[in-house]
Structure formats: structure tokens, C-alpha cells
Image (cartoon, helix red, strand yellow):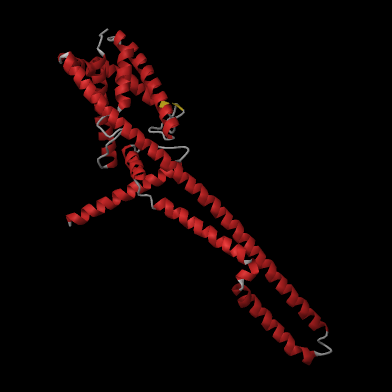
Amino acid sequence: MHSYYLSQWIIFFFIYSFIGWIWESGYVSVKNRCWVNRGFMHGPILPIYGSGAVVILIATLPVRGNIPLVFLLGMAAATVLEYFTGAVMERLFHVRYWDYSNVRFNLKGYVCLPATLCWGCFSVLMTEAVHLPVEEAVLSFPLKAVEYAAVILSVAAAVDFTQSFNEAMDMRNILAQLEESRQQIRKMQERLKLTAQDAVEDYRMRSEKVRTDVSGRRAVLIEGIHERREAYRSLLEEMASRADFLLKEELPSRVDELIGRERREELLEIRKNILQEFQKMGARTDKNYLHALSHLRRNPTAVSGRFREAVEELRKIIEENAGNDTSDDEGENR
């Protein structure tokens, strides 16, 4: 077994984090047909790859050369790391930065059998091929130089991680606010619907009452029509004309009187509140909101069970902005 100093382990972590960043960013950029700086952090590192590589090395170096054991131990160590990292990140940010829920043989969406097998293959590839030149290169540098490099990279990564962590928290807060706005809109829409239904029902009942009154009076007139046919003919026609005018023109124009001024004002207030909520959702341009968009842009595979609709809304905004940027570029080219 090879024994490394702490500074050398740190350098290994950053090397494999960088390799992971190249792979992920390249893959996602080709898939999206545009450059994507992939990962939780701003810098060119993906800590999950660096952590996975270090964990695999710690688990497999004692059995280096024994490929079956390297495969099994590396696979198990990396899978456990991936599971707990995914669970902790979702608990902190209410967002899954990767999700295997649609893959067969997955465990709560954090790990799955195909990814686990890939970790095993990666373990063999790394310990038997990739790590050999990396190890030789790191060990060839003076220990002091490695220690200085480890300190500088650690400080830079700590600053980057702090900023990225704050952005992830900003995104969590934005998602919570968007979801709260959506809930408020749903409640107000339901209230508006019920209030409008009550108003329509009141209008129908009052209209029915008018019809009943008119019909009753007409029936009384008709009973004596044989005795006073000519005397009541003009009055009957006048009543019919008056009823038609009342039902078609006067009743609809007297909404306040029919449904009540308070109910009408309540309807208007609910509509106003709904409009304000929509305006609030669409007018977010503060720094935290921009941070959330930037963070989600770097993590296009992120999903959220708790804030699913809010994540999709932010993703649509990103796509619209990308479309606008493309249009602007084409306009400039012309």
C-alpha cells in the first residue's frame, strides 16, 4: 500500500475533481448544444468526483492488483458516498442535483445499479491505469511545493464553495417563495370561484323570483280573461313587455343591488390579489433571484419533489433567456 501525505491527498482530490468537471461539462454542453459550466461550484471542479476518487483510492489501494476486489470495494465505497451526499444535499437545499428515480433498480433515486456498476468499472480503470501517471506526477514534486499548492487550492475552493452554498440557499428560498405564491394564487382562485358561484346563484334565485311573480300575476289576469278580455289585453301585454325588459336589461345592470356591494367588492379584491401575486412572481430581478437562476443553469439535471413546479418555472425562464440571447446575437450578426 502506498502512503500519502495529507497535502498529496488534497492534490489528488483536486485533480480528480477537475477531471470530473471536464467530463460532466463536456457531456452536458454537447447534449445541450451550448457551453454549460457544470457543477455545484463556479470553479472547474466537481467535488463529488474528487471525493469519490479519494474514497475509492482509500478503499482499494490495499488490494491494488486484485481486480475483482478493486471492483467490489471501489463500487461499494463510491455508492455509499453518492447516496449520503445526495441525501444530505436534498435535505439542505430541497433539491436533488442528480436523480435516478426513472432508472430501474434505484434506491430512493440517489443511487442505481447502472451507476453503481460504473463506479466499479471506474475504480478498476483509475487504480490500474489513470492513477499511475497521476501518482507519479504528484510524487515527483517537492513536498513543500505540494503543501503550498494544497493550501492555495483549498482556500480558493473554500471561497468558491461558500459562494456556491449561499447561491444554493438563495435558490431554496426563491423556490419556497415561488411555491408560497402559487399556493396563495390557488387559494384565491378557489375563493374567487366560490364567491362567483354564490353571486351567480343569488342572481338566479332573484331572477327566478321575478319570473314567478310575473307568472303569478299573469295567471290571475288570465283567470278573468273571459270576463274582461278587452280590458286586460293591453295590461297583459304591458306586463309581458315589462318582464322581458326586467330580465334582459334591468337585472344585469343592477349587479350591485342583486349580489350586494360587499360581495362585488370582495370579487374585485380577490382578482386584484391574484394579479398582484402573478406580478410578484414575474418581477423578480433581485440578486438572490439571479443567483438562483445561475445555480440552476449550472445544474440542469436538478429536480425537486417539494418545489417541482417552481423548479420548472425557473428552468423555463432560463430557456427563454437563452432564446433571447440567441436572438440578440443573430441580430448583431446581421
In which quadrant of the rendered view does residue 301 lie? top left
In which quadrant of the rendered view does residue 16 lie? top left
Query: Residue at the location (41% across, 47% down)?
Result: 313
Return the x and y of residue 150 as percentages of the image width and height.
Answer: 23, 21
Whether 297 is drawn above or below 123: the answer is below
Residue closer to the observer: 25 or 102: 25
Quadrant where the N terminus sits is: top left
In which quadrant of the rendered view does residue 143 lie? top left
Return the x and y of residue 76 as percentages of the image width and height.
Answer: 38, 17
Return the x and y of residue 21 as percentages of the image width and height.
Answer: 26, 30
Is residue 273 left or right of 8 when viewed as pictured? right
Any part of residue 327 in sight: yes
Query: Residue at the location (68% across, 82% down)?
Result: 242
Query: Residue at the location (33% across, 17% down)?
Result: 55
Any part of residue 40 in sight: no
Return the x and y of residue 41 as percentages of the image width and height.
Answer: 30, 33
Residue closer to the observer: 157 or 295: 157
Quadrant where the C terminus sits is: bottom left
Whether 42 is drawn above or below 53: the answer is below
Residue closer to the observer: 149 or 123: 149
Query: Residue at the location (65% across, 78% down)?
Result: 246
Residue closer to the observer: 2 or 234: 2
Which residue is at the far right?
Answer: 227
Count numbered badges in the picture.
Answer: 0
